[in-house]
């Protein structure tokens, strides 16, 4: 009792001081503090940054700073980042990062500035750090250091053609087995369409395959060793590759999001397993607006464990002006900007924005948007950010997962050999951790 | 007096010229030497996947010997090099002969013939990726409209290298043709007049006169294309990224991925220096050949 009272007596003043201090920080906060400075932003030229940069002028007006944007496609952006960071150069202040992919690696290399203190102390009154998705903040925290602030929430979801399902007498699939059965039926019922499509390109496979593996109940690592040859691992490899081999489009081994979206949008695929970010591309032109249903990927033996990731904004550890860079990160991940981005179809990483009346009104305008948001709600609550192996060499681990899947799609190896070869290579990577 | 003054002035002039050109020479040498020396130095370093760097001696080079991907990449590089070079030289000479003999061909048609190599390889790669898409592309539509079976093109481990070689040949055959056309225009007409008087057939004239006289030009074109073909990168990167599996994983693509995707800059440098040595070897061999066929 005494201890409890002591704790209360100590804790209350500490909390009060912290609250007053935070208010003081918020009150002191001045967006014009770094007026005249130039912040360089290395951007991945994807829908997330495109939506954000629509408001570039607003940032410059608000802060008096100049925002210099260095934009590239995803792989080229990483190539540029690696060059800049290896040279310890300060040319980049802020960059986009995928914590689920390169987080461990960049954190271990010391390429992220620690944002913990800035996110706590140096924030505007309405920033609301606590309002950001806690799961995404956790996924961006390495060794106790907050390395990036979430820009969006995304993950692979299941797109299906309601008209084809109706024509073939099918109902929306509830399980992975239902997906396979539907593909089988569509193959005979409507031979003009590809029954199922998902990623087959080697480095891209892990994004969708991870969802399948987790739904089936598999894990990438067990007892410190690669686990693809476990019963669940083999079942996931076999199911994923069989769906693509037997029901996918010809040449699926070269398919990533561009090809999948193009195929589905053109009406030549009945089911597609692709990123929630692709909604805008898929609906472009309006042909798929009224005949598409959206779901999280159907359940396996372990239920639904969707993949949930998000792009983050990180401050370079080599930046000479991390405080000014933080102002840009803060503005870009603020509730106000994220609401504007959400109205452009970028899923917000803030529950408060997702529940905003204006955003809800936009969602309610189209049934397909409602289904999209419902799927995202499942991703936000049940999602796992594990895409590929949770090790420092995560990008390389994705190669071996992709190789095993391609070996099976192309029938180049029996499953035991494909998973054993992958496990051998992956064990070597795990050992480097 | 004047005998000693003249050399002094000349020496001074030489000194002035050297001093004036020194910055440009230094800059040029530094621009070439720095990346090479830096890459050689990197080749002796090892980088962990977290970017930590340490001296590795010859470890990166000894790793090459036992690295299956290196030997596989070398094989793919050579296969692509041979196939593409043969296609481009054969069709380049043929196209040059067509353009040389069709003197009334309008300038715009000539320009169209040689236009593909003016297109950036990335654009060419994107364009062919769409054309060769097994589901949506025009190539399979054309094949099927002639009753032929569709192909997986870039998605087939068997056909990916011939398909990439075809794309590259589509783009660069006109370049070879342009070089050969220059060679054809410089051939002495007297030799052809003599052949005509002797009653040589067009084929014999080509076989015995045109081809031997053109050989130095063809070898020059081969040297220029060899350098590019051994460093083949952009079209593969755009279309297959080394796949399916590792069926189009050339040395250059492999080195790029080791360096920029897996962050092992030391081993990637060793791979790239080995590729540079191979390119140098090929150029030296072709240079010797050019010396042997010169007239």
Image (cartoon, rainbow, N blue to C red):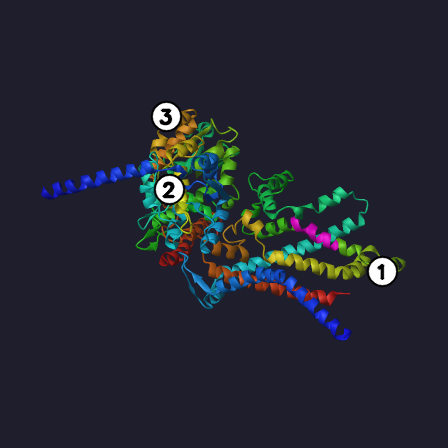
Please identify, in this view, whether the residue under mark 1 or under mark 2 is nearer the observer.
2
Q: Nearer the viewer, mark 3 or mark 1?
A: 3
Identity of the residue drawn at 67% across and 46% down: B116
Q: Compare residues A4 and A286 and report the one nearer the observer.
A: A4
Q: Indicate whether A74 appears above or below B65.
A: above
Residue extending farthest right: B197
Q: Which mark is residue A331?
A: none
Q: Chain of mark 3?
A: A
User: The residue tagged with tag 3: helix, strand or loop?
Assistant: helix
Question: Which x, y percent locates residue B264?
Answer: 45, 58
Choose top left, top right, bottom left or bottom right for residue B150: top right
Tag shown at residue A357: 3
- Pointer 2 or 3: first along the chain: 2
Q: Tell me, yes or no, if residue B19 can be seen here.
A: yes
* Number of the front mark, 2 or 3: 2
At x 32% / y 55%, what residue is drawn?
A224
Residue contact at pointers 2 and 3, CB within 8 angstroms: no
* Residue B178 within the magenta-colored segment of the rendering: yes
From the viewer's perspective, tell me whether residue A399 is left or right of residue B116. left
Separation (CA) of disc 1 from disc 2:
76 Å
Looking at the rendering, the stretch of residues picked out in magenta corresponds to B170-180
Query: Do the residues indicated by labels 2 and 3 lie within the same chain of the protein?
Result: yes
Q: Is residue A135 left or right of residue A240?
A: left
Residue B191 disc label: 1
The residue that label 2 is drawn on is A149
* Left or right of residue B94, residue A376 in this image: left
Asked if marks 1 and 2 touch (Cβ < 8 Å), the reply is no
Q: Is residue A396 positioned above or below B65 on the image?
A: above
Can you tell which quarter of the image residue A1 is in? top left
Q: Position of residue A2 (x, y in %)?
A: 9, 43
Taking the magenta stretch, the answer to whether it contains residue B172 is: yes
């Amino acid at each position: 009792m005494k201890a409890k009272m002591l704790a209360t007596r100590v804790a209350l003043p500490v909390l009060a001081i912290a609250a007053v201090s935070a208010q003081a920080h918020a009150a002191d906060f001045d967006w014009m503090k770094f007026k005249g400075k130039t912040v360089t932003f290395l951007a991945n030229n994807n829908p997330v940054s495109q939506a954000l940069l629509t408001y570039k002028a607003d940032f410059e007006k608000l802060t008096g700073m100049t925002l210099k944007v260095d934009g590239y496609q995803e792989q080229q952006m990483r190539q540029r980042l690696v060059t800049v960071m290896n040279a310890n150069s300060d040319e980049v202040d802020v960059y986009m990062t995928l914590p689920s992919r390169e987080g461990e690696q960049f954190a271990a290399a010391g390429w992220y500035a620690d944002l913990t203190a800035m996110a706590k102390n140096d924030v505007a009154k309405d920033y609301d750090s606590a309002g950001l998705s806690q799961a995404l903040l956790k996924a961006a925290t390495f060794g106790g250091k907050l390395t990036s602030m979430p820009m969006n929430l995304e993950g692979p979801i299941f797109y299906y053609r309601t008209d084809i399902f109706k024509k073939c007498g099918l109902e929306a699939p509830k399980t992975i087995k239902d997906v396979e059965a539907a593909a089988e039926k569509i193959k005979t019922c409507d031979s003009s369409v590809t029954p199922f499509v998902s990623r087959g390109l080697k480095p891209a496979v892990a994004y969708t395959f991870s969802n399948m593996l987790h739904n089936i109940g598999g894990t990438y690592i067990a007892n410190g060793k690669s686990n693809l040859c476990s019963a669940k691992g083999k079942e996931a490899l076999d199911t994923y590759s069989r769906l693509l081999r037997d029901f996918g489009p010809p040449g699926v081994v070269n398919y990533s999001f561009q090809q999948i979206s193009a195929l589905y949008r053109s009406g030549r695929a009945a089911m597609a397993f692709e990123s929630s970010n692709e909604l805008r591309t898929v609906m472009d032109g309006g042909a798929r607006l009224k005949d598409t249903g959206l779901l999280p990927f159907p359940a396996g033996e372990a239920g639904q464990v969707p993949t949930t990731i998000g792009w983050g904004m990180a401050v370079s550890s080599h930046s000479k002006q991390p405080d000014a860079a933080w102002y840009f990160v803060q503005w870009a991940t603020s509730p106000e900007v994220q609401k504007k981005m959400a109205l452009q179809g970028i899923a917000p990483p803030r529950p408060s924005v997702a529940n905003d009346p204006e955003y809800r009104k936009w969602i309610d305008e189209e049934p397909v948007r409602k289904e999209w948001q419902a799927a995202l709600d499942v991703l936000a609550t049940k999602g796992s950010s594990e895409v590929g192996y949770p090790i420092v060499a995560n990008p390389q681990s994705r190669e071996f997962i992709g190789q095993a899947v391609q070996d099976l799609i192309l029938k180049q190896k029996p499953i035991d050999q494909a998973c054993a070869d992958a496990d051998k290579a992956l064990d070597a990577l795990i050992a480097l951790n | 007096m004047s005998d000693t003054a003249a050399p002094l002035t000349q020496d001074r002039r030489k000194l002035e010229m050297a001093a004036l050109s020194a910055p440009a020479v230094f800059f040029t040498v530094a621009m070439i030497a720095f990346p090479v020396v830096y890459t050689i130095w990197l080749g002796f370093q090892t980088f962990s996947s977290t970017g930590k760097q340490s001296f590795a001696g010859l470890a990166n080079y000894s790793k090459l010997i036992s690295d299956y991907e290196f030997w596989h990449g070398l094989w793919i590089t050579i296969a692509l090099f041979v196939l593409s070079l043969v296609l481009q030289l054969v069709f380049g000479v043929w196209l040059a002969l067509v353009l040389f003999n069709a003197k009334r061909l309008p300038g715009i048609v000539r320009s169209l013939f040689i236009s593909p190599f003016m297109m950036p390889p990335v654009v060419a790669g994107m364009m062919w990726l769409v054309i060769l898409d097994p589901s949506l592309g025009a190539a399979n539509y054309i094949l099927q409209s002639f009753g032929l079976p569709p192909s997986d093109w870039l998605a087939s481990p068997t056909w990916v290298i011939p398909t990439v070689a075809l794309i590259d040949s589509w783009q660069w055959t006109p370049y070879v043709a342009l070089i050969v056309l220059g060679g054809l225009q410089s051939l002495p007409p007297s030799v052809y007049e003599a052949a005509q008087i002797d009653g040589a057939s067009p084929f014999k004239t080509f076989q015995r006169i045109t081809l031997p006289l053109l050989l130095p030009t063809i070898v020059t074109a081969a040297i220029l294309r060899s350098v590019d073909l051994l460093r083949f990168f952009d079209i593969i990167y755009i279309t297959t990224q080394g796949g399916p599996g590792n069926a189009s994983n050339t040395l250059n693509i492999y080195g790029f991925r080791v360096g920029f995707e897996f962050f092992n800059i030391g081993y990637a440098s060793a791979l790239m220096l080995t590729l540079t040595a191979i390119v140098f070897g090929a150029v030296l061999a072709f240079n010797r050949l050019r010396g042997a066929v010169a007239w």
